[in-house]
DNA sequence: ATGTCCGTTTCCAACGGA
């Protein structure tokens, strides 16, 4: 079984690349992030024609996560229990308007595909360390850790994959120059601690296990010739429950998918799983 | 040159988000 995760950065602008990826890599499941489309405008037909079913949640032009599967999609959840919302920004101030209820964003979707509980996750970016979005990011990861811990407590033998764009670089060697990120998000100790919380909850991050080489990236910014200079970041990860980790035989990062016109700024991460 | 890209709108140029 092959399960991939990819921040596609607009499913409509890259639908052909997505279908090509499914066919070429013989994928059973593809978890997508940043589909940037409302449910009613999601291009499901090309996936269906290729033999896949789709579960998607998208509320606006921002965020949006999907699971594409040819091995079934059951028990779809469009958020995890306790998933925090984000307060609506007040237009005049650019600050959070606490008088408005927080908005539950389309950043998590779960479904059972071929016996594996797959979660496609788009962790909040954080923007700036002193921005409310940063606190939201930490809260979001803490809530995910809490809930993911209950899934394992309820069923220690469950096969669970928590895949997606985590927007955290856990190691200094996950970026080209940690000095560039001083005062910025993605490398701060609180973000790294929040990311490590999933390991504390009993999950194993599989890309690190199978691809330990330093400076192995999954994302290169469109700006400043980051890809030609190979100035990237490893921020897309796959946490697995013990049963799934034991069944996983390999991880592949498709660096070539960043090449050419019309590439996403992220590349797919693929898990090979026994049976 | 913030060496870019996406989707949206106060709509074809400017802006937010990343």
Image (tube, coloured by chain):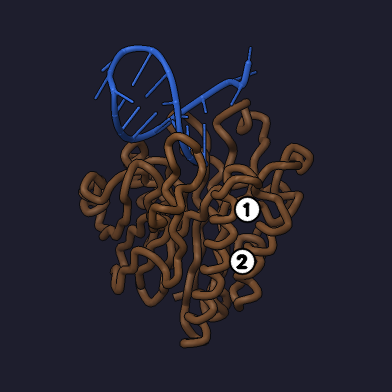
Chain colours: A brown, B blue
Q: Is circle 2 on the same chain as circle 1?
A: yes
**Residue at 31 percent of width and 56 percent of height:** A56
Give the secondary structure at mark 1.
loop
Considering depth in this image, is A209 or B4 the residue closer to the camera? B4
* Neighbours of disc 2 within 10 Å: few (<14), some (14-19), many (20+): some
Work out whether residue A56 can be spotted.
yes
Q: Which residue ends up furthest to the front in the rendered image?
A: A99
Q: Is residue A199 above or below residue A217?
A: below
Q: Is residue A196 left or right of residue A257?
A: right
For discs 2 and 1, the disc positioned in front in the rendered view: 1
**Residue at 66 percent of width and 35 percent of height:** A230
Residue underneath mark 2: A205
Give coordinates of residue A48: x percent, y percent: 22, 54
Give the secondary structure at mark 2.
strand
Residue underneath mark 1: A168
Give coordinates of residue A145: x percent, y percent: 56, 71
Give coordinates of residue A14: x percent, y percent: 36, 39
Quadrant of the rendered image containing residue A90: top left
| Image quadrant containing the C terminus of chain A | bottom left
**Residue at 59 percent of width and 38 percent of height:** A220
Q: Which of pointers 2 and 1 lies earlier in the amino acid sequence?
A: 1
Q: Is residue A83 above or below residue A30?
A: below
Considering depth in this image, is A137 or A211 the residue closer to the camera? A137
Q: Is residue A87 above or below residue A224?
A: below
The label on residue A190 is none
Tell whether label 1 touches label 2 (CB within 8 Å): no
Quadrant of the rendered image containing residue A117: bottom left
Considering depth in this image, is A270 or A122 the residue closer to the camera? A122
| Image quadrant containing the N terminus of chain A | bottom left
* Neighbours of disc 1 within 10 Å: few (<14), some (14-19), many (20+): many
Q: Is residue A115 left or right of residue A93?
A: left
């Amino acid at each position: 079984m092959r399960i991939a995760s990819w921040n596609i950065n607009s499913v409509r602008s890259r639908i052909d690349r997505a279908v090509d990826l499914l066919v070429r890599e013989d994928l059973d499941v593809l978890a997508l992030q940043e589909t940037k489309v409302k449910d009613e405008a999601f291009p499901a037909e090309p996936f269906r024609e290729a033999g896949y079913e789709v579960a998607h949640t998208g509320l606006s032009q921002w965020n949006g996560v999907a699971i594409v599967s040819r091995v079934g999609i059951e028990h779809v959840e469009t958020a995890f229990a306790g998933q925090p919302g984000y307060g609506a920004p007040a237009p005049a101030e650019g600050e959070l308007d606490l008088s408005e209820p927080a908005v539950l964003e389309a950043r998590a979707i779960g479904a059972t595909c071929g016996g594996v509980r797959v979660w496609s996750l788009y962790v909040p970016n954080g923007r700036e360390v002193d921005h409310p979005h940063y606190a939201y990011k930490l809260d979001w990861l803490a809530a995910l850790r809490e809930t993911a811990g209950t899934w394992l407590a309820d069923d220690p033998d469950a096969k669970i994959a928590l895949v997606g764009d985590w927007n955290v670089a856990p190691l200094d060697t996950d970026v080209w120059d940690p000095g560039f990120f001083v005062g910025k998000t993605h490398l701060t100790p609180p973000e790294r601690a929040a990311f490590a919380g999933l390991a504390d909850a009993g999950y194993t991050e599989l890309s690190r296990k199978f691809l330990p080489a330093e400076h192995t990236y999954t994302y290169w910014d469109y700006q400043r010739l980051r890809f030609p200079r190979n100035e990237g970041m490893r921020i897309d990860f796959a946490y697995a429950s013990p049963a799934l980790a034991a069944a996983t035989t390999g991880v592949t990062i498709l660096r070539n998918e960043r090449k050419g016109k019309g590439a996403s700024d992220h590349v797919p991460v693929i898990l090979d799983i026994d049976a």
